Structures are given as C-alpha cells and as structure tokens.
Image (cartoon, helix red, strand yellow):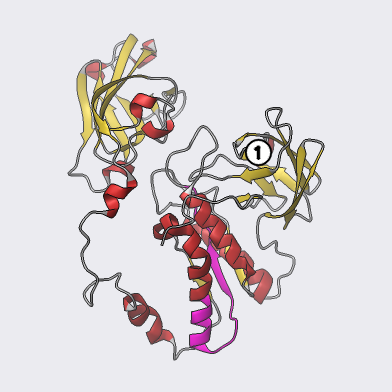
Amino acid sequence: KLPAGWEQSGKPDLDIDGAVWFRKQIQVPAEWADRDLILQLGPIDDNDVTYFNGVEIGSTGLDVPESWQKPRSYNVPARLVKAGNAVIAVRVMDSAGGGGIYAGPMTLVPEGLSSGPINLATDWKYLVEASRPTLPPSFWNTQPQQPYGPGSAVAPTNLWNGMIHPLLPFAIKGAIWYQGESNAGRAYQYRSLFPGMIKDWRSAWGRGDFPFYYVQLANFMAKTPEPVESEWAELREAQTMTLNLRNTGMALAIDIGEAADIHPFNKSAVGERLARWALARDYGQTDIVASGPFYKSHEVASGQIVLSFEFAEMGLASLSGQALKGFAIAGEDRKFVWAQAKIVGSQVVVSSPLVRNPVAVRYAWSNNPDCNLINKAGLPASPFRTDSWPGLTIDRR
C-alpha cells in the first residue's frame, strides 16, 4: 500500500537498498481520452523512472539535488491516453537509508482540472529487481570524516563567535529559536545540551532570565502504519522537558510539517504560535491562549488510562470533529498498539481491548504522526509519552 517507505511496508523482502518496480492498473474515464494528464507521485527516495502504458514519461536522477525529497509531477501526453485500462509503472532506485514512494499526494488528473482525480494512494504490485541488505547505522559511523578546524562551519565556537557573541553589547528583549533536526540522533543528549545553551546565553547577556521561545520539531518523513520508536519523537520530548526552565515557551508544529521537506512551507503559523507566547507572557494580553495542550498527569483505572492536560481549561476537541487519532497504549510487555481515545471534558480516556492491564500511553510518537487532538483555541497538542522506558538514543553522544 502506497505511499509508504520500503522499511515501513511490513514486507521482509523490502528491507533493502536497491531497485524495485511498482505497478498499478487503472481505468481511464472516456472523457479523459486524448487529453494531457498530470501524474503526481509525491517524493520518491532516491531516484525513479516512470512509465505510462510502457512509455517513459519522466525521471528524476542523481543530477537533481536532494532528489529523495522532491515531489514527482510528470506529464502524460495526450497521445498515450485512451479510455479503459492503463498501466502506471515506476522503477525506484535507492542507494542507502530509507527508500520508496513514501509520501503523497498520489493522483492522476487531466491537465487544468483539479476536481475528480484518480486516487493512486492505494495498493500497488511490486517486484524487487536488485537488492543488497540495508546498511547498518554502524556503517555510517565508520566513514571518513572531514576534520574539524578553524575553516569548518561546524567546529566548536565558530557559530557562537560569528553569530551570537557580536550581539552581546546590544539590549535584548528575548530570543526565538527553531533548531533540533540535526540533534535527533542524540536526543537524550539534547535534554541537557539545549537548556545548557539557554542558560549560557542568559549568563552572557547578564540581563536575567529573558524570554526564550522555541519551536518543537514539525512532523517530517514517511508515516508509519504501526506504533514505533522514533528519534524525532525523543527530540521533541527533550524540547518539552526544556520548559522546566523559567521563562521559556514552546510553539507546537506537529500539524504543519511536510513529509518530504525538512523546511516546511507554512512559516506564518509558526510565527503566529511563537507570537502567542510573547503576547500572553510579555505584553499583557492575558486573554490569549499561549499554546496547545501539554500532557500533565494520568491515572490508571478499570483497564483505562485517563490523561489530564495543561492549556485545556476551556476543554479539548479533535480536529474537524473526527475520532481521535495518534494514541497508542501498552501493558507491562511494552508492546504498543493503537488505542481508542475519547474526550471527557478536559481529559482524554484511552483504552484498547488488546491491552487489558495498561500501564503507558504515547501520543503522536513518531517522525510524522497522524494526530488530531487540539484545545478549544484550535492549537495542537504536544506529542508525549507517560512512560520513561529507554529510547533509541539513550546512549548516544
């Protein structure tokens, strides 16, 4: 079923690097015959050659920068479009890391017409052409590294000396910060690294605990069909923990990211959510809700876990009134399954018939979760977990 990365497909023979063919048969409506069509496949990791009825209609190769996150959109010339059966085939090549047709949109529609597209985000046939086992993380840790030094942008002290230290003579009202993607592989370390940086800035300016507002990592990369461990979720947790520092605030972006773009397009929502913290905390506009819900506490009773939240005084809701999504529950075996969740006032009650004696709940705990819990101000809830079981990055430095 596409879109999904190979490694998230649940198919053992797709836990590979290599080349895989995907094939889908469709029915072309009679009114589309002899018209140019637009085929959208979303981003493909890494490269592809795409065919319509056996004729190549487009490709994206190694010559395209960051090809793995470039959405594919190919023209199907009118001469190939006939009413009735048609076959779309995509040869995907992946050299390392994740691979596949991993994010939408996936549609076929006549050029100039946006309504009534054929949805291609369904089941496809596949055939492995060539493969090798996926390279383990240890492989990348043994590759030659350019030595750090005065000429390296990432050498210790370079960014501080070049970008922050020159500002110290100037007055400061506060700071906003959006970073963390490159630290996701060492998320536990970020629990001390990030608050340590904030303390250092405050000390350097000598103006007390000035406001420091930052953005939690947005949703990114392929979605996963089942509950998983996640480096990005652990980094978001480290960012949430930093709220223990005085005069900090975190803008939530778990609903406005893009699977294929680490720098998502919707910048205005990020700015507005940062502004909420400043207006509510620093400019006296106490009627403004500063944030979406944050997990506060939980109770276990009668096979259910009842969750309580901050920033939920006016109540909770689900986006567009749909059933709550993104909650997973586990017992002592630590095996998480998707859970049923319902809103009761300012609390959420979580359960599953598969877990009779639950001990832990996780919400939006993945790189790119499907989640829809909001407060009455329309702001999304922060990802969280009630457990403290060791994560993927606990021993990484």
Q: Relative to 183, does residue 163 appear above or below in the rendering? A: below
Label 1: how many residues lie within 10 Å, few (<14), some (14-19) or many (20+)?
Answer: many
Horizontal side of residue 316 vs 155, given as left or right: right
Residue, far top:
84
Disc 1 secondary structure class: strand
Which portion, as a residue range, is magenta?
Answer: 198-219
Query: Which residue is at the front of the view, 168 or 188?
Result: 188
The residue depicted at 44 percent of the width and 91 percent of the height is 169
Residue 48 lies within the magenta run: no
In which quadrant of the rendered image does the N terminus lie? Answer: top left
Residue drawn at the location 48% of the way across and 86% of the way down? 204
Total number of numbered discs in the rendering:
1
The answer to whether residue 39 is above or below residue 326 is above
Q: Residue 302: x percent and y percent?
A: 82, 36
Occupied quadrant, residue 186? bottom left
Q: Would residue 23 be seen by someone viewing this image from the given angle?
A: yes
Quarter of the image for residue 44 reads top left
Work out whether 204 lies above or below 335: below
Amino acid marked by disc 1: Ile
Quadrant where the C terminus sits is bottom left
Q: Is residue 68 left or right of residue 302?
A: left
Q: Picture coordinates of residue 303 (x, y %)?
A: 77, 35
Q: Is residue 110 something that shows in the picture?
A: no
Residue 307 percent coordinates (x, y) = 74, 48
**Left or right for 335, reference 141:** right
**Residue shown at 67%/63% (left/top)?**
290
Give the residue pinned by disc 1: 329
Q: Position of residue 333 (x, y in %)?
A: 62, 37
Which one is in front, 356 or 223?
Answer: 356
